[in-house]
Image (cartoon, grey):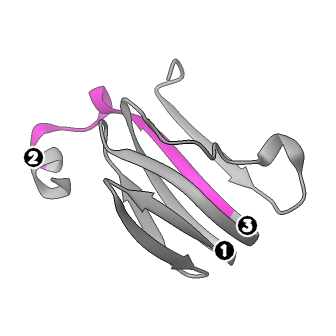
Amino acid sequence: MEMGIYLRRFLPGVSQDTPVTYTHQDDYYMFGFVEAGEYEICIDFKTYQITAGTVMMTQPGQVYELLNSSGLSAYVLFVDSTFVEEIQKRVFG
């Protein structure tokens, strides 16, 4: 991630807002808030059902894949790990 900190909104039916749907890892933190709809995500080989009103997070190095989504409207904050202090990393870990 070249931007350091970046906020992105995903809306249903908008092709450029389609989340990545293959298994992968990132080198940054992702903090997501689901405004509407729902999705299923596999993080480190465990599957989660995420619904409206839910906040979620992935850490650098976690393996994840978006499996399914329905009517998903969400905000995702991408944060380079250099912006996260050591004490915060321990809390997230």
Q: Which residue is mark 2?
A: 87
Can you give x and y, in whole percent of width and height, for residue 17 in the image?
78, 47
**Number of residues whose C-alpha sits closer than 10 Å to that of mark 1, classed few (under 14), some (14–19) or many (20 or more):** some
Magenta residue span: 74-87
Of marks 3 and 1, which one's residue comes earlier in the chain?
Answer: 1
Q: Is residue 20 magenta?
A: no
Give the Cα distance between marks 3 and 1: 5 Å
Q: Amino acid at mark 2?
A: Ile
Q: Amino acid at mark 3?
A: Ser
Q: Which mark is residue 79?
A: none
Q: Which residue is mark 1?
A: 35
Q: Amino acid at mark 1?
A: Glu
Instruction: Assign a secondary structure to mark 2.
Output: helix
- Vertical placement of 55 versus 8: above or below? below
- Vertical placement of 92 versus 49: above or below? above
Q: Which residue is mark 3?
A: 73
Instruction: Assign a secondary structure to mark 1.
Output: strand
